[in-house]
Image (cartoon, grey):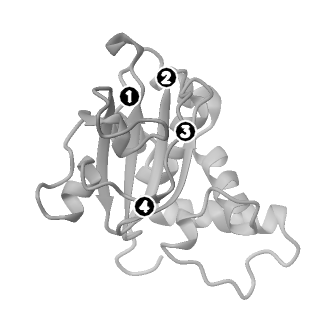
Amino acid sequence: MKSGLAIERFRFTVAHEIGHCRLHVGGFIDRTDSGKTFGIWNDASEEAEANTFAGELLLPKDLFIPRIEGKTPSIALVDKIASGFRTSRLATAVQYIHYTNEAVALVLSHGWDIEWSRKTKDFWPTVKSGRISKDSAAGERLAEISSDSGGMVNTPAYAWLVGYDNNSDKDVKEDSVYLDYYDRTVTLLWWDDDDE
């Protein structure tokens, strides 16, 4: 095991490499994976396929769904599940989006740039692409106004969602946290129908 590599990261790395061996000709020979590689979940690349394979191997549906049913969306919930499965926060968050019945979206950003987003079918607004809004919790952390959101907070819908302007009084719930290993921010957005 690479010195200093957390067990969660090590387990995911092994599962990711098994994914390469199982899915791709040549397996993991001559591959160099990094924190950036393990953040790729949104395209048709071999790296995204290996990440998806690893997520399914380590966080299987039949064991995952009972841990999220009836629970309020949050990074804390993702962390609790990740701790139980000994998996990374990002891999667990991706599986959460895959299996939850809540109207949530997951956004991965690098600095002020949104790299990708993934949402459930019930999260009907479109998540913006491009730059992080300074009016979001993630933006406040980047501007060093505050630290990670520390739980779901109300954020103006226009900060994250297409179709809302600065005059809109609609909010979306946001939970954002910086992931040091990836040098990325992961954001969980929740479109809570109870707020309508």
The residue carrying pointer 2 sits among few (fewer than 14), some (14 to 19) or many (20 or more) residues within 10 Å by Cα, namely many
28 or 116: nearer the viewer: 116
Q: State the separation of the CA atoms marked 3 and 2.
A: 16 Å
Mark sitting earlier along the chain (4/2)? 2
Question: Mark 3 — residue?
Answer: 126
Say what secondary structure mark 1 lies in: loop
Q: State the separation of the CA atoms marked 1 and 2.
A: 7 Å
Q: Residue furthest right?
A: 25
The residue carrying pointer 4 sits among few (fewer than 14), some (14 to 19) or many (20 or more) residues within 10 Å by Cα, namely many
Say what secondary structure mark 3 lies in: loop
Quarter residue 182 falls in: bottom left
Q: Residue at position x 46%, y 63% from top?
A: 9
Please tell me how many numbered marks the rendered image carries. 4
Amino acid bearing label 4: Ser
Left-right relation of 36 to 158: right
- Residue 73 image label: 1
